[in-house]
Image: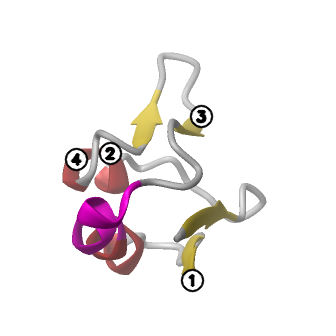
Amino acid sequence: MKVVVDYDICAATGSCAQVCPEVFEVRSDGYLYVLIEEPAEELRSKVEDAADLCPTAAITVEG
């Protein structure tokens, strides 16, 4: 699985980081960072939940 973020539409609301802090982080500079671009399979449900909750649909999960 690969996490892809469209930073052009990402609003950095932090909802993804609340659901899956292992993979997503909004830092003090106000930008979203993907900590693990290819997370382990056991994180799939959390990553997919984070993508589903993204208000701008900026997160996609490939594979």
Q: Residue 51 is drawn in which quadrant?
A: bottom left
Residue position marked by numbered label 3 in the rendering? 31
The location of residue 53, given as percent across then percent down, is 32, 73
- Magenta region, main secondary structure: helix
Q: Which residues are magenta?
A: 40-47
How far separated are the C-alphas under marks 3 and 1?
A: 25 Å
Closer to the chain start, of discs 3 and 1, is 3
* Residue type of the residue flagged with mark 4: Gln
Residue name at image x 59 percent, y 50 percent:
37
Q: CA distance from mark 4 to mark 1?
A: 23 Å
Q: Secondary structure at mark 1?
A: loop
On the image, the x and y values in percent for residue 4 come to 65, 65
Q: Cβ–Cβ below 8 Å for labels 2 and 4?
A: yes
Across and down, in percent, residue 23 comes to 40, 45
Task: Return the disc, 2 or 1, that comes first in the chain's sequence.
Answer: 2
Q: Which residue is mark 2?
A: 17
Which label sits in the foreground, 3 or 1?
Answer: 1
Q: Amino acid at mark 3?
A: Tyr
Disc 3: CA contacts within 10 A as few (<14), some (14-19) or many (>=20):
some
Mark 1 crowdedness (10 Å alpha carbons): few <14, some 14-19, many ≥20: few
Q: Residues within 10 Å of mark 4 (few under 14, many from 20)?
A: few
